[in-house]
Image (cartoon, rainbow, N blue to C red):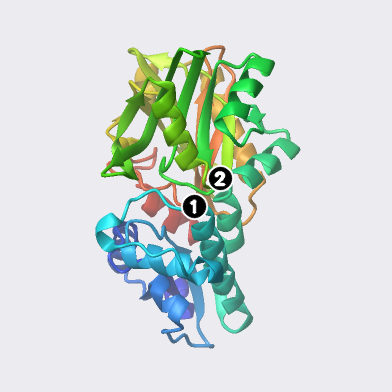
Amino acid sequence: MSNLKAQTKHLIIAPKESRRAKFWIQLLEQNNLSYLHLSYLDIISDYFSLEKDIQYIVRLESAGEDFETYQSIIHFEKNATNQILAKENFGELSNFESWYIGWEKVLKKIKDLENIFQLKFINEPLDIALAFNKKATQKLLLENKVSCPEILTSTSYESLISEMKAKKIAQVFIKPIAGSSASGIMAFRYFDSEKQKAYSTVKKKNGNFYNSLKVQTYETKEAIKEVFNEIAKSELQIERWVPKWQFNKMNVDFRVVVINKKVEFIVPRGSRSPITNLHLGNQKLKLEDLNLSSEIIEKIKQIALETMLCFPGLHYAGIDVLLSKKAKVYVLEVNPFGDMLLNIVNEKGNTTYEQELESLI
């Protein structure tokens, strides 16, 4: 620990009011480790100063939950000058591709700083950018024989219905390829032209579409098509909706946090709807309460580890793993910022942040 203090300084890049950054900074202060906190706004505007004779251990945190950061990232993509969003409309469904292009450019700019300064990234910026692209991530995983739900290639509502019929697929998940935190997501079930149902985090209000913290249910073709068309303004990732394993009538999947090539946390997430993200009010379950066999738990761990091998630049990540009713496992998402698990400790009694810091020493 003392050697680490003498030679290095921690650099956190995150919005100034980021809860995640505050958790990390609190831990650094408890361990008497020096640090510098820069915001993404600082990076975009070149409003920062680093020292060339110090090695920085760089932790990037989520750029979400901050309006100015969001707006600046969109404007950092040169073709997005028309993407003007009033602060009161923060949360409105917008063009995910413009945001992603800007986000990728910001991450590339951060990566290029290592040509000038001594930077050691905990999670490499370019691996973070890759993980944010759902289509590229799944392509990489499939190339490495990691199981993922089957992909559909349709780009319109009508062509999707035709493809589902042709492939005898009754239900699908629809996501923007660069969305996160369940933004712009829809779980769609098709019975026939008169009977269909969708669950979505998208809600229409005063003529505009917003991300909602409450899952919405749509049961008419007109309403479903309207929401689909709004989501489809960005490039889509459409995949077969594999029914999740259930516990107490809840759909369950697993957030698996891998740190330094080891599974440290498995958090089951239970939901009455098909969408299990915890920030939507779903339940954080205990693995030991589910009565899963050691064989199934090992399957969940193994597919998470196989996934991390595809991202050698990620020291830690949260992998979302689906367990089907037939006991097969699939990877749904790779979350480079998927480690914020509140009130959860591992076998050592460490939180995710404590385990990550310990793994660096």
**Relative image position of residue 343 (x, y in whole percent):** 27, 41
Query: Pointer 2: what residue?
Result: 177
Nearer-the-camera pick, 72 or 359: 72
Q: Return the x and y of residue 240 as percentages of the image width and height.
A: 58, 24
Mark linked to residue 96: 1
Residue occupying the point 34% across, 12% down:
249
* Residue 88 to residue 201: above or below: below
Q: Is residue 190 left or right of residue 130?
A: left
Q: Amino acid at mark 2?
A: Ile
Question: Vertical placement of 300 versus 124: above or below?
Answer: above
Residue at (71, 36) in percent of width and height: 142
**Residue 35 drawn at (x, y percent):** 37, 74
- Asked where in the image residue 349 lies, by quadrant, the reply is top left
Q: Is residue 276 visible?
A: no
Q: Examine the rendered structure and indicate whether residue 122 appears above or below residue 292.
A: below
Q: Is residue 142 left or right of residue 259?
A: right
Cβ atoms under marks 1 and 2 closer than 8 Å = yes
Q: Few, some or many C-alpha atoms within 10 Å of disc 1 (few <14, some 14-19, many ≥20)?
A: many
Residue 138 percent coordinates (x, y): 64, 39
Q: Assign the N terminus to one quadrant of the image.
A: bottom left
Mark 1 or mark 2, earlier in chain: 1
Query: Hey, which quadrant is residue 183 in on the image?
Result: top left
Give whichever of 126, 71 is nearer the camera: 71
Mark 1 residue type = Phe
Q: Check disc 2: other Cα within 10 Å, few if <14, some if 14-19, many if 20+.
A: many
